[in-house]
Amino acid sequence: MIPFLNLGKVNAEYRDEIVSAMARVVDSGWYILGNEVREFERRFADYCGVSQAIGVANGLDALSLVFRAYIEFGQMAEGDEVIVPANTYIASMLAISANRLIPKPVEPELHTFNLDISRIEDSITSRTRAIMVVHLYGQIGYSDELQKLADKYGLKIIEDAAQAHGALYHCKRAGNLGDAAGFSFYPGKNLGALGDGGAVTTNDAKLADTIRALGNYGSTVKYENLFKGVNSRLDELQAALLSVKLQYLDRDNSSRRAIASKYLNLITNPRLILPGCLCQESHVWHLFVIRTELRDLFQEHLRQRGIGTVIHYPVAPHKQPAYVEWNDYSYPITEEIHRTVLSLPMAPCMTEAEVQAVIDACNCY
Ligand SMILES: *Cc1c(COP(=O)(O)O)cnc(C)c1O
């Protein structure tokens, strides 16, 4: 049996170091906003190549607090619009909607699953304030072309980097490409905690200070409240083990690349469409997503061979009850993606035999 993802096995690799980091926190007697969070923020900022990282409770909050800060600055207001890929995980859009901003879905490219930059301009209006670029499945969606477009219209670029820890665009990391980025440390992500966690990265110190305050009841000095904030903090336990796992992120991402390159080279079944990869460094293979017309039958075939798969994602955001106002809209490329995608097992701890078994099962269908 090859599960889609065995998180116990992923973390077993670092068990001793994780346990001693957690013991250190237990013994310290300090569990919220202490040295562990400060230390992880410094390490994660250095890793991403930015000056600021702010730990928050989860990836959705990371993205949401970026918009909230721009609203506090008066740079965005209720009813303003944010361009977002139509096929993203719904959290990207919820972060926009939560701030009473309006997500404007734009179709992706079929072969990379990322925003089709040539379609953005038609969706820009006088109310557009930002483009949220999602590095979906681990591949960078940002480009110089996107930056030019943002500059031309004076738009912010917000990265949803929840699936792309460590991915590079021309030597710059995800998290250092736009005005600000949101990361998730949900357990299954490339850098995963043992619970919820997230971070904002940016080179804008004022933005960072505001987000830090917003996530702590709107306060920078205890019992002095500048904003009507929320409680969204990374805790010391998660920060301590994330510092451990961050040391191995590049190694884990290389393992993912090695597995992806085997899949790309050795899966030869013409009924399966393999994912497009623009360049090695720009993809960290959070997910390996293929497309096929007979998706449900193919998933059943793999299940019978003991191989677990998951559909990311079965229903497009514009078809969800949560966005009932969009249910009649038509995004044919996005709908095509949701109808045909299937994610194969992908984890740094997969053995060569497991990878080969997945390849064999794909080729004999
Ligand atoms: C996981 C994820 C999020 C949300 O992160 P959480 O930590 O689960 O809140 C946002 N966007 C994308 C693309 C994600 O994959």
Image (tube, grey):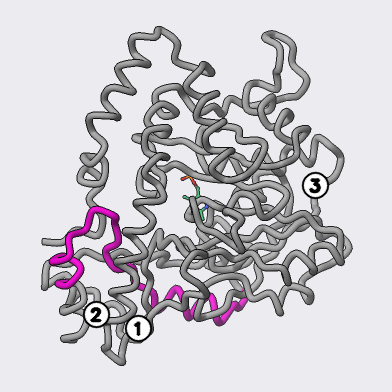
The C terminus sits in image quarter: bottom left
Q: Mark 3: few, some, or many residues within 10 Å (few <14, many ≥20)?
A: few
User: Residue under circle 3?
Assistant: 78
Image quadrant where residue 93 sits: bottom right
- Work out whether 18 lies above or below 273: above
Q: CA distance from mark 2 to mark 1?
A: 8 Å
| Amino acid type at mark 1 | Thr
Mark found first going from the N terminus, 3 or 2: 3
The segment highlighted magenta reads 329-357
Please report contact status of discs 2 and 1: CB closer than 8 Å, yes or no: yes
The residue pinned by badge 2 equals 298
Residue at the farthest bottom position? 270
Up-down relation of residue 354 to residue 188 (above or below): below
Q: Dividing the image into 4 quarters, which one contains the N terminus?
A: bottom left
In this image, 82 relative to 345: left or right?
Answer: right
Q: Mark 3 is on which residue type?
A: Glu
Amino acid type at image mark 2: Phe
Q: Nearer the viewer, mark 1 or mark 3?
A: 1
Q: Secondary structure at mark 2?
A: helix
Magenta residue check for 327: no
Q: Position of residue 239 (x, y in %)?
A: 44, 28
Residue linked to disc 1: 292
x and y, in percent, of residue 302 in the image: 18, 73
